[in-house]
Amino acid sequence: MMTCLRCAVTLGVALLAACQPLGTSHEGFSGDMSAVEALGRGEAMAETLCASCHAIGHRGTSPHSDALAFRRFGWNYPIEALSESLAEGIIVGHPDMPEWQFEPQDIEALLAYIESVQEPRST
């Protein structure tokens, strides 16, 4: 379970790190973003930073066999629990996962997107 959490956190951090600082190309973006803005920002981050390893949407398999699909993160832990890890930076246990650290607005956006794609665990 810890490896999945680390992958999830690392994925989120990677997405945010690839984005330019908020004050440059995202003028007007703030921590007071709407739900629509948060989802759009989070999805863009996921596509840029995470999709090369993780399945980021409602369907598909992860390109990297060890990368948990975003839609299943909630099967192992609450999505909101990733917030602190994303803020502090994550280093995962396998060599090809980068270390990432995110700003509060980016954490909010990424977690909003991850929450939006969760699927219920089948019984």
Image (cartoon, rainbow, N blue to C red):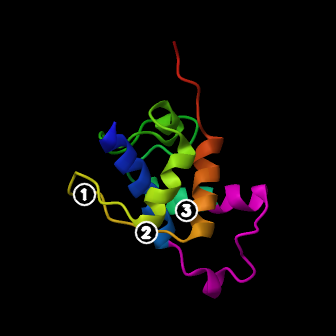
Residue labelled with disc 2: 101
**Residue occupying image coordinates x 62% and y 87%:** 24
Within 10 Å of the Cα at label 1, are there few (<14), some (14-19), or many (20+) other Cα atoms? few
Q: Position of residue 60 (x, y in %)?
A: 49, 35
Q: Position of residue 112 (x, y in %)?
A: 64, 51
Mark 1–mark 3 CB contact (< 8 Å): no
Element carrying mark 2: loop
Q: Quadrant of residue 100?
A: bottom left
- Residue 98, compared with residue 123, is above or below; it is below
**Residue occupying image coordinates x 37% and y 44%:** 63
Residue labelled with disc 1: 96
The residues tagged by marks 2 and 3 sit, at their Cα atoms, a distance apart of 13 Å
What type is the residue that disc 1 sits on? Asp
Element carrying mark 3: helix
Q: Position of residue 2 (x, y in %)?
A: 32, 42
Q: Is residue 29 magenta?
A: yes
Q: Is residue 34 left or right of residue 64?
A: right
- Which circle, 1 or 2, is nearer the viewer? 2
Residue labelled with disc 3: 45
Nearer the N terminus, badge 1 or badge 3? 3
The part of the chain drawn in magenta is: 19-41
Within 10 Å of the Cα at label 3, are there few (<14), some (14-19), or many (20+) other Cα atoms? many
Within 10 Å of the Cα at label 2, are there few (<14), some (14-19), or many (20+) other Cα atoms? many
